[in-house]
Amino acid sequence: MNAHDEERLKNLLRQALPPMEDDAGPGRDLWPAMLRRLDEDSAASGQVWAWFDGALLAGLVGLVAFFPAAIPVLLYCL
Amino acid sequence: MQNGSSSVLNQFRQGDAAAFETLFRQHQRAVFGWILRIVRNPASAEELTIETFWRIHRAHARFDPAQGFEGWARRIATYAALDWLRARRAENEVGVDAVAELAAPLESDPAVTAEIRLKTAEAFGHLPPKLRIAATLAVVEGQPQKDVAAALGISVAAVKLRVFRALRLLRKDLEKQGITP
């Protein structure tokens, strides 16, 4: 493809896809939607932590049940 | 003013919510406009603007105030748009509808028929997203190549190469359809 072909294709492309307006802006204030997204994100991460806390607690209970000798060690760590 | 904006950037880096809102309000229009140039669909551009700022919010600790906010936000916006184009491509929805709606310039060359414009727009919609973004920004939107390179995180030479590859693939596709550009 030579420079002439390249330029012709570029012109064709500009004909097919006109450039967007320079000063185009969103049709609404996006901040409320942004806040919703952030709230959803923090709620989701809260759920992950709740699950993680539960799993950690279950692990500790299991450890104490199967290895009672570990209780003094745990108490020492606390 | 400079100290004020620098202070906002530093506060944002530390995770301050008010600073994030300030930056959102200052830059949402520019980010939306940049994304719109890539995806060419206002509703999708609004969604992607929110996605971009969500990514920005999550990455606040990695932000370097010395590098400025606009370029950083633009790069994140470009990659959010790239992910969107890839997802659409994976779903076999290449955005041709949106592209075709816009395929009617006000000052069109009479030698280029509406059918050719539509087929060109469709063929362009089939290009790999990375090539499509480079060609959209550099050729269609006429953005400076250094700005396109910065937004994509590549060199100017790489932008030129991507544009060249995009045009070559476009020509092949059009030739298959019996159109000699």
Image (cartoon, rainbow, N blue to C red):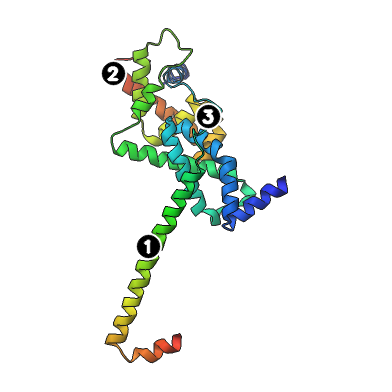
Q: Residue furthest top?
A: B110
Residue at figure coordinates x 47%, y 32% from the top left: B36
- The chain to which mark 2 is attached is B
**How would you rate the neighbour count of disc 1 (Cα within 10 Å): few for under 14, some for 14-19, many for 20 or more?**
few
The quadrant holding residue A22 is top right
Q: Secondary structure at mark 3?
A: loop
Residue at figure coordinates x 44%, y 89% from the top left: A76
Query: Which residue in the protein does label 2 denote?
Result: B177
Q: Nearer the viewer, mark 2 or mark 3?
A: 3
Q: Amino acid at mark 2?
A: Gln
Give me the disc on residue B118: none
Number of labels in the image equals: 3
Q: Amino acid at mark 3?
A: Ala
Q: Does residue B167 appear in the picture of this structure?
A: yes
Q: Secondary structure at mark 2?
A: loop
Q: Amino acid at mark 1?
A: Gln
Q: Does residue B169 appear in the picture of this structure?
A: no
In the foreground, B50 or A69: B50
Residue at figure coordinates x 47%, y 14% from the top left: B106
Query: Which residue in the protein does label 3 denote?
Result: A24
Query: Which residue in the protein does label 1 denote?
Result: A47
- Label 2 and label 3: CA atoms lie apart by 34 Å
- In the rendered structure, are the residues bearing label 1 and label 2 in contact, judged by CB atoms less than 8 Å apart? no
- The chain to which mark 1 is attached is A
- The chain to which mark 3 is attached is A
- Label 1 and label 2: CA atoms lie apart by 53 Å
Q: Position of residue B70 (x, y in %)?
A: 58, 42
